[in-house]
Image: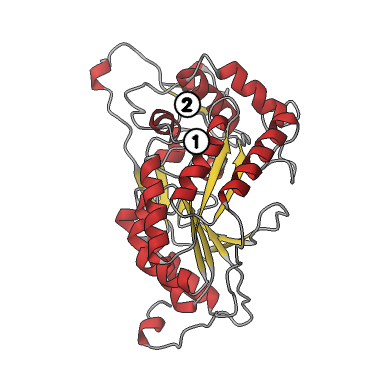
Amino acid sequence: MFYHQPMIGDESNRIPDKSRRARGATLNMAGRFERLEHVAVDDGWERDDEIAPTRTEVALERPRSIIARNQSPDVPFDRSINPYRGCEHGCIYCFARPTHSFLGLSPGLDFETKLTAKPDAARVLAAELSRRGYRPEPIAIGTNTDPYQPIEKRYGVMRQILGVLSDFRHPVHILTKGALIERDADILGEMGATGIASAGLTITTLDRRLARAMEPRAAAPERRLAALRHLKAAGCPTRVSIGPVIPGLNDHEIEALLGAAADAGVGGAGYIVLRLPREVGPLFRDWLEAHYPDRAKRVMGLVREMHGGRDYDPAWGKRMKGEGVVAELIGRRFAAACSRLGINRGLKPLRTDLFRPPSAGPEQLALF
């Protein structure tokens, strides 16, 4: 092994195929704050059949606070909760990947294999909601990393958080690619019926091959549709998010995706176009060359056309929808399909007037 100054996307960062089995990233470059990068060199001694798949590692974090605040003018919420750092779903396009750089880890393979769970999240949340002067507004969960990624089955942090929100009658929006959300249909159904919860599933494609390549450990497209039906039947309002829309790769599916979601009973829908902030750009480009080399040049050309000639334009009002002819056409097609299918009609905001901190009985005091 040796060390060198990091060069994002060069061949020395390439992960052996067997080591990244069922993973999204093809690279594991150092984060942007690292001065040096650890590089594996083939010295001829390790046989190909001795390379083992990279396993998921989970560290535990004891947070002092759990509600994150934002003032972004182009998102419809001002607070969110992230039960986990990193995401085992491994979506190659995930705009949250660069956050792993703040932990001294790679936005590449590390983001999907070196995760952090927050087992105290529910206790901390109860304390924050109980503070004098707290004013309720809908909390968004699933806007950064997925609350129903595979490790949730082991740690159950999200279900505990939902228990607290239900006790406080606090409104919550959830977005996920995980079919595990069906487990919590009992809580979400009751909260949804009283107007304080809604649940969304992100569905990027109906093509199983493309889904497996882009989102290797997320639920299959048909399982996400089944989860929408399950939640709807339980009484929870549902919506679908088509994101990201990638011109030249999945944009031709907009109408079919919305049709499938309408058949599953969704009331609302939204979309975002592909976002490639910081290290996500080279990660996505390398993945595209590895999986769809015949389309790579055209796809990136269309992406840049939506972002003013760059891989990504972070400007508020442009980063989510893009600009130009390609972005405008995507928006018009989406709006026309929603209108034809009756989606996004009569949507009601979540209620905040039902918020009540529970009485501090023995069970509640145990949270503090």
Q: Quadrant of residue 139?
A: bottom right
**Which dot, 1 or 2, sits closer to the camera?**
2
Which amino acid type is shown beneath numbered disc 2?
Answer: Leu
- Left or right of 299: which side holds 114? left
Which residue ends up furthest to the top in the rendered image?
Answer: 44
The disc placed on residue 106 is: 1
- Left or right of 65: which side holds 160? left
Relative to 287, say whether 77 is above or below. Answer: below
Which structural element holds mark 2?
loop
Which residue ends up furthest to the left in the rendered image?
Answer: 49
Residue 153 is at least partly visible in this image = yes
Work out how far the residue at label 1 is from the one at label 2, CA to CA, in angstroms. 9 Å
Relative to 316, say whether 279 is above or below. Answer: above
Counting the numbered discs, the total is 2
Q: Position of residue 112 (x, y in %)?
A: 42, 39
Q: Which residue is mark 2?
A: 27
Between 289 and 175, the residue placed more toward the observer is 175
Q: Position of residue 250 (x, y in %)?
A: 53, 30
Q: Quadrant of residue 351?
A: bottom right
